[in-house]
Image (cartoon, rainbow, N blue to C red):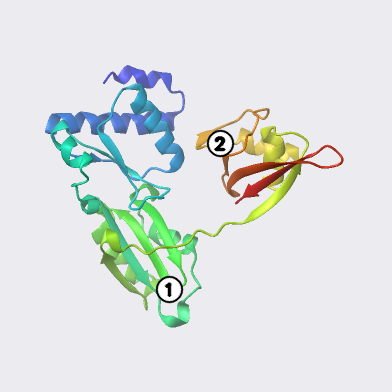
Amino acid sequence: MDKNILNQYKKPEEKLILSKIMDKIEFCKLRNQVQVTHFLDEMQQQLVIKFLNLQKQTNYVLLGGYETAERAMLLFYPDKLEPLIKQEKINFNEWIKVIRITLPNEMEGKYEHRNYLGAIIKLGIKREMVGDILVDEKGADILVHYDSLSFLLANLPTLTRFQKAKIEEVPLQEIRKVEIKKEEFTITVSSMRLDNIVAELAKCSRSKALELLEQERIFINHEQVTKQAKEIKPNDRITIRGKGRFFIKEVIGNTKKGRILVKIEK
């Protein structure tokens, strides 16, 4: 692969991610063995997959640990493993590990996603070493990069919040099933322009919505967007960092004053 291709990317963080990806592909070919990345969020995955498509690279799979995972590793494999990959005979448990935290009865329901993630970050583990965190009232299953498993198993019990909890590794196939909570509501906008939609979703003024765009906190279908006049359509997915993820379910119709009624799922 030609590393000069990176010059087409202006943002340093994108260049860094893609440079690491190119190194993984090169090592995979030279060593003739599997190479895996750290966990990528949905926006990073979109960036990398577009890049790989441009480079006509196909020897990879996304590993999130379960079908609808938001954060995932990329696993690159040599040609010799392609038949096994296609036949789904490769055991991915080697690369993604699961730490289960079971809370004592008196603590059930008191911790949220941020409490578990905050504990891990407090221990000095980078976010890229952690995949999805599946939380219910009894505790959480935390998907982690295999390199961080031993450290977390040894150090999570030292934190005050988890001293009475049971902390153990469990097989990937036993990961807990957690229902994602969704909320439906309706907004009214003067047009389907992005700035109008963001102002309603974030419950802020148009000027504040423009600030969010300028701060590069808005993503449509996992791609960063800064153009306020972009038209939003049904089935678009909008992420506003710090505010949540939103799905444009349906344009219902118009009010008597001509405003557009839009059904949203958060």
Q: Position of residue 169 (x, y in %)?
A: 26, 65
Say what secondary structure mark 1 lies in: loop
Residues tagged 1 and 2 counted as in contact (Cβ below 8 A): no
- Which numbered marker is on residue 220? 2
What's under tag 2, amino acid-wise?
A: Ile
- Residue at position x 72%, y 37% from top? 196
Residue 86 versus residue 177 in the image, above or below: above
* Residue closest to the eye, 20 or 87: 87
What's under tag 1, amino acid-wise?
A: Lys
Judged left or right of residue 208, residue 87 is left
Instruction: Give the spatial CA distance, label 1 vs label 2.
Output: 34 Å
Say what secondary structure mark 2 lies in: strand
Give the quadrant of residue 134. bottom left
* Residue closest to the eye, 200 or 123: 200
Q: Position of residue 179 (x, y in %)?
A: 48, 61
- Residue at position x 28%, y 30% from top? 58
Quadrant of the rendering where the N terminus is positioned: top left
Q: Is residue 246 visible?
A: yes
* Residue closest to the eye, 141 or 174: 174
- Residue at position x 28%, y 59% from top? 172
Q: Position of residue 22 (x, y in %)?
A: 28, 28
* Residue closest to the eye, 148 or 47: 47
Give the quadrant of residue 171. bottom left
Mark 1 = which residue? 138
Judged left or right of residue 266, residue 39 is left
